[in-house]
Amino acid sequence: MKLNCDKGILLEGLNLVGRAVSARTTKPILECVLLFTQTHKGLTLCGNDLEMSITTAVMEADVEVPGMIALNAKLFTDIVRKMPGDVIQIEVDEKGVAEVTSGRARMKIFGLPGEEFPLIPEHELEHVSVRHRMKTTTLRDMIRHTIFSVSMDQSKLILTGELFDIKGGLLQVVSVDMHRISYRSHVFSPPEQGEHSAVIPARALHELSRVLPGDEEAEVTFYFTDNRVVFDTADFTFVSRLLVGDFIRYDQIFNEDFNTLLTVGRAELLNSLERALLVAGENKLVPIKLEMTETELIVTASTAERGHAHDEIPCEREGQDLIIYFNPRYIIDALRAIDEDKVVIKFTGAKSACTVRGLVTETEDGTTVPIGSKTARDDQKYLIVPLRGPA
């Protein structure tokens, strides 16, 4: 194997696939990045930790001798980064020793046979007839709007991922941690056929969201096999294993009924809760109190160790007065994920979960409606379970 490649292009590819390289493993091959060429068409990189893999699109390179080699990802990346020139030459001998040259600098690194690298068999990714396409920015936002509600409880492994539920031309992404539910939907345009339901590990979605292009015109195509999900962009292919198990029936939990409906400024409520959190501290059992009157939302928090917080926020309230207690972090996470200036919160009682949505303008006459109503295109909502108040 012998080739020349632009240093910047090579580093960009190494940083990308490095996200799928195992940091802690007893298998040296999983600490490697695979370099391979197909005839003289360029260089491709791949990282795979057996749970997810990232493969670059073919990168521009001057390939003199095609081949493949697995090199320790961290060591190779550090070597390339510290090379003095703008062009990197890589030459691999018959013993698997890679010589990396740039300018007057020359270093050697011992590699492993590329054939030992765990590439995903091509036949597992072929013959998939139903593929879905959407903007990369939309998918990235859907992950951002829901990922924080994934459970950390490893005893309920299925809840450590997010449900991707596709039916009727609608993609629904759901996460649950038993104290709250985050929901985000997107209508495919044009409408797409096919139905599929699968749970993708949160770690994979975290990494995917970090590498998805921010270009408004960029698109991602994704599809499911029996035990994997594949995301294709113009720059890379991202593959993740799926979690196995029965996800909760989220569609039966959200309820549009309410006894109290609150409309309040998102930033005002967020800032108030963050101040209250300073008093509540790190104790998740210390609640904040929300008291709703016709024109004001009163936010209070009190602990013997840290002090007392009190805020009065202008609001619009329909229905009954209400006093209810919450873990402030759960509402803060939802408010940070909502982009609208105002939020609508529906309550059915002091001991029942509330539903939080943004308030958006969707109608032609400029009237505002809660996102998720019949006039809204996509839906984003959060269900949050209250805490028991002081005795």
Image: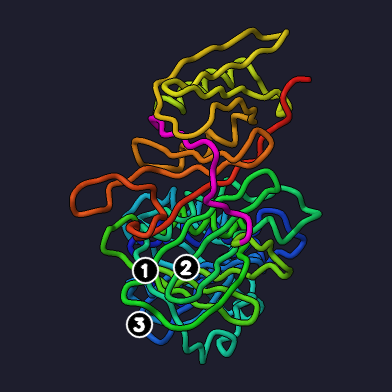
Q: Which residue is drawn at 53% across and 33% down?
A: 332
Query: Is there a contact, CB below 8 Å, between mark 1 and mark 2?
Result: yes
Residue pointed to by mark 3: 41
Q: Which residue lies furthest to the front in this view?
A: 319
- Residue 263 lies in magenta, yes or no? yes
Q: What element carries label 1?
A: strand
Q: Quadrant of residue 249?
A: bottom right
Label number found at residue 38: none
Q: Is residue 72 visible?
A: no
Q: x, y (%) of residue 205? A: 54, 58
* Vertical position of residue 205 compared to residue 299: above or below: below
Q: Looking at the image, which is closer to me, 229 or 276?
A: 276
Q: x, y (%) of residue 226? A: 64, 82
- Name the mark nearer the viewer: 1 or 2: 2
Q: x, y (%) of residue 98? A: 53, 68
Which numbered disc, 1 or 3, marks the residue that appears first in the sequence? 3
Label 2 to label 3: alpha-carbon separation: 37 Å
Going by the numbered disc 2, the residue's amino acid type is: Leu
- Name the mark nearer the viewer: 2 or 3: 2
Q: Residue at x 59, y 68 (%)?
A: 240
Residue pointed to by mark 2: 171
Q: Which residue is drawn at 39% across and 55% down?
A: 373
Going by the numbered disc 3, the residue's amino acid type is: Lys
Which numbered disc, 2 or 3, marks the residue that appears first in the sequence? 3
Count of number-bearing discs:
3
Q: From the image, which quarter does the C terminus lie in?
A: top right
Q: Is mark 3 on a helix, strand or loop?
A: loop
Residue pointed to by mark 1: 134
Q: Looking at the image, which is closer to me, 226 or 9?
A: 226
Q: Residue furthest right?
A: 155
